[in-house]
Image (spheres, rainbow, N blue to C red):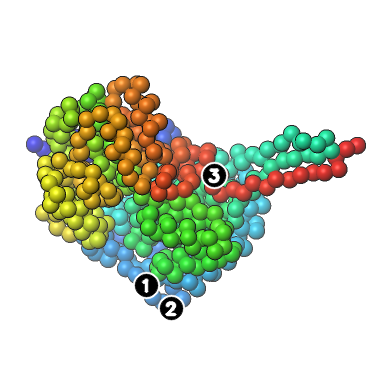
Amino acid sequence: MAMMGMAGVAARSARHRLSCSTGHLPSMRASSPPLSRQITMDAQSLAARLKSSGLLRSQGLIGGKWVDAYDGSTIKVHNPATGEVITEVPCMGSRETKDAISSAYDAFQSWSKVTAAERSRHLRKWYDLLISHKEELGQLITLEQGKPLKEAIGEVGYGASFIEYFSEEAKRVYGDIIPAPLADRRLFVLKQPVGVVGTITPWNFPLAMITRKVGPALACGCTVVIKPSELTPLTALAAAELSLQAGIPPGAVNVVMGKASDIGDSLLESSQLRKITFTGSTAVGKRLMAGAAATVKKVSLELGGNAPCIVFDDADVDVAVKGTLAAKFRNSGQTCVCANRVIVQEGIYEKFATAFSNAVQNLQVGDGFSEGVAQGPLINEAALHKVESFVEDAISKGAKILLGGKRHSLGRTFYEPTIMTDVKSDMLISREEVFGPVAPLLRFRTEEEAIRMANDTNAGLAAYIFTSNVQRTWRVTEALEYGIVGVNEGIISTEVAPFGGVKQSGLGREGSKYGIDEYLELKYVCLGNMSH
Ligand code: SIN
């Protein structure tokens, strides 16, 4: 059988093909033309070309100036597909972070007073620049993160969509007038920007996790200090360069990277910085939340998930396979909303397992720049070891390998797309986020049992259900303790809907009309002595 990419597997549905390759719901207006050229290319010559285009930056950004670490130290950024060093970036710490906060604080004094219409125009310009550099940014993402180029370019569209969306929302930050309880009073509510925001982002979406925080922050008048992951700082730096080109004033967007704990501590300690927004592990999120207490900062957290994907007997098998494939194998399983447990009702278990296995075995693994590749490498050795240890634990407790189950013959951090059967709720792979291309299949009998299994976790980000019964859809959706539920759909991410979790998956929502509230303070104003 010819090897096909994820898009090929899903060729039955054009909509699915697009969603699957980009990993988010397609925006009606931001659709991109298909890639018309051969995407295989030599990573080193690509890096050289990106450098000459000005988008491969290797310095941090403080107060509108590109700067090295004050002690000159650097960290290497690697291509996870080859292990090659792409470039080096400054290894910054407390001093640089404090200066970045001061710059953001100074810039806040003017940016917060600029009209909403003007902020909106700057954000729109930034969006236009991100889109016009979609290919180069996609190449940077593939280079430093490893995801297939088509998926990386999809991430640029997804990431840019937050800037576009919040360029529009900037003009809709309305206050309120409250009917006063006394005749001589007038009461109203102003919405004002919280101030300087510290933005700590992960490596799995080097652009989109930044833009969905920075978009709403800038839109309502906040300024930001971004700390991207040290594994993937290059996309963040390129996006920051484009923000300057868009006319966003120096100091409104700052980028520091390097010693994560020093940078994190400086952000937490500063009384000039009024909010921390973080996407990443639950463990780090808890530390940030505790640390923010000292200066009583606002905190938004988008933390780990343990997404159940429930397939009921009455599901359409093709729809369930297509949705589970997208929910599990997007970004090689490295998203917080990836299906972590595929919970299948006993009457459809064998049929689903066979069909799912047929689809998964067609996923082509390789360097993200190679044509047809649907699964790139895992980000690093630690990620690979985690996947291996979870699989070993499950096997030692009785799970079976239906497909894959080991490192890929390509070596490095490539892992075979894997399906395991006979998985039980007490295995590590059911308890914790595997963050890799392994789909464990668990079995259930009744709807009540499925709900109990799905909710038996501290996480509560995304859940998926596959059923053709409308009443069941409502019943189960309401019973699931999750912030997001996909029904007969594996791709749920879009800038227009609120993204976020309950329980230990986090606090707050990103994207949508609700996302901007995270960056606003309410000020109640009472006007007295209003009688004539
Ligand atoms: C994440 O993995 O945290 C984000 C995934 C998404 O935006 O779809």
Identify residue for label 2: 71
Label 3 and label 1: CA atoms lie apart by: 35 Å
Q: Nearer the viewer, residue 241 or 313?
A: 313
Q: Which residue is mark 1?
A: 74
Residue sitting nearer the eye, 286 or 15: 286
What's the distance in space between the residues labelled 3 and 2, CA to CA? 37 Å
Residue drawn at (35%, 33%) of the image: 486
Where residue 362 appears, as percent x and y from the top left, is 15, 39
Which amino acid type corresponds to the residue marked 1 in the rendered image? Thr
Callout 3: helix, strand or loop? helix
Question: Residue 379 at what x, y percent from top left?
Answer: 27, 57
Question: Which image quadrant for residue 27?
Answer: top left
Where does the C terminus fall, quadrant-wise?
A: top right
Q: Residue 416: x and y, percent?
A: 15, 49
Numbered disc 1: secondary structure: strand
Kindly tell me whether mark 2's CB lies below 8 Å from ligand 1.
no
- Indicate the quadrant where residue 443 lies: top left
